[in-house]
Image (cartoon, rainbow, N blue to C red):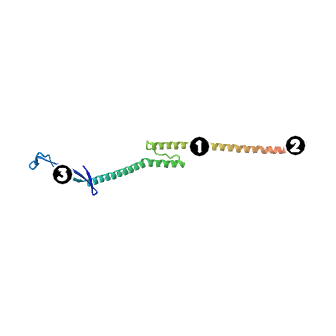
Amino acid sequence: EPIINDHNEQHMIRFLPIENASTCHTCHAPQIPILGVIKVKYSLTPSLLNVRNNIINRLIFSMLAIILFALIFSYIAIKLINNPLEEIMKTVSYLEQGDLDKRIQVKRDDIIGKLAEKINRMAVKRSEAARELEKYHAMQMTRASHMASIGEMAACLAHDIKNPLACMSSALQVIDGEME
């Protein structure tokens, strides 16, 4: 079936045989099987336009579906990933500023939930270490205070012992100088 381009329009041409049916035998001899041929010229332009429009519609639908999928995926990503990470970052900022009692509310059992648990454990350990350091510092301050008190007492005692000894030493020097 040849396709012919005629003035920028495509046509399909078919040749259909006209068969000698029994109703035709009154006018035509029954021995002739084919009485003639009909040339049918069919324009393909409407069909091609229809195919082109279908392709364009499917492309538009596909693009809209991809955009819709991207929007849904973005929304899910924001809800499931970004919002929990923002909460984690906010809590880490509090911990960084010294609020060691701040904790992340763990509501998930995925990697983000595990990260939140690890940060909570780290905060607990840091809080315990800070309390231990404060306790050690308080002990050191008490010990330093005791040592300062002992030093002050020793200085007073040395002063109290040195004054009478200095007087006795001076008296002995005077006595030694006067006696032969």
Q: Is residue 35 left or right of residue 122?
A: left
Contact, CB < 8 Å: mark 2 with mark 1?
Answer: no
Where in the figure is residue 87, as x and y percent of width and height?
47, 48
Q: What's the residue type where badge 3 is placed?
A: Ile
Pick whichever of labels 3 and 2 is earlier in the sequence. 3
Give the label, 3 or 2, closer to the camera.
Answer: 3
Image side of residue 128 versus residue 48, left or right: right
Cα distance in 3D space between marks 3 and 2: 164 Å
Measured as percent of width and height from the top left, residue 6 is found at 26, 56
Q: CA distance from mark 1 to mark 3?
A: 106 Å
Outermost residue toward the bottom in this view? 7
When asked about the image quadrant of residue 169, the answer is top right
- Which residue occupies the extreme right position in the image? 180
Q: Residue at x 46, y 42 (%)?
A: 114
Distance between mark 2 and mark 1 Cα atoms: 61 Å
Q: Which mark is residue 133?
A: 1
Q: Dot 3, how many residues are within 10 Å of its Cα: few (below 14), some (14-19), or many (20+)?
A: few
Q: Looking at the image, which is closer to me, 50 or 70?
A: 50
The residue singled out by tag 3 in the image is 38
Q: Amino acid at mark 1?
A: Leu
Mark 1 or 3 closer to N-term? 3
Residue drawn at 20 percent across, 52 percent down: 39
Compared across the picture, whether 25 is left or right of 170 comes to left
- Image spot of residue 109 (x, y percent): 43, 42
Question: Quick one: SS at disc 3?
Answer: strand
Q: Which secondary structure lies at badge 1? A: helix
User: Which quadrant: the C terminus?
Assistant: top right
Q: Position of residue 163 (x, y in %)?
A: 78, 45
* Mark 2 neighbour class, 10 Å CA radius: few under 14, some 14 to 19, many 20 or more: few
Q: Which mark is residue 176?
A: 2
Q: Residue at x 19, y 49 (%)?
A: 16
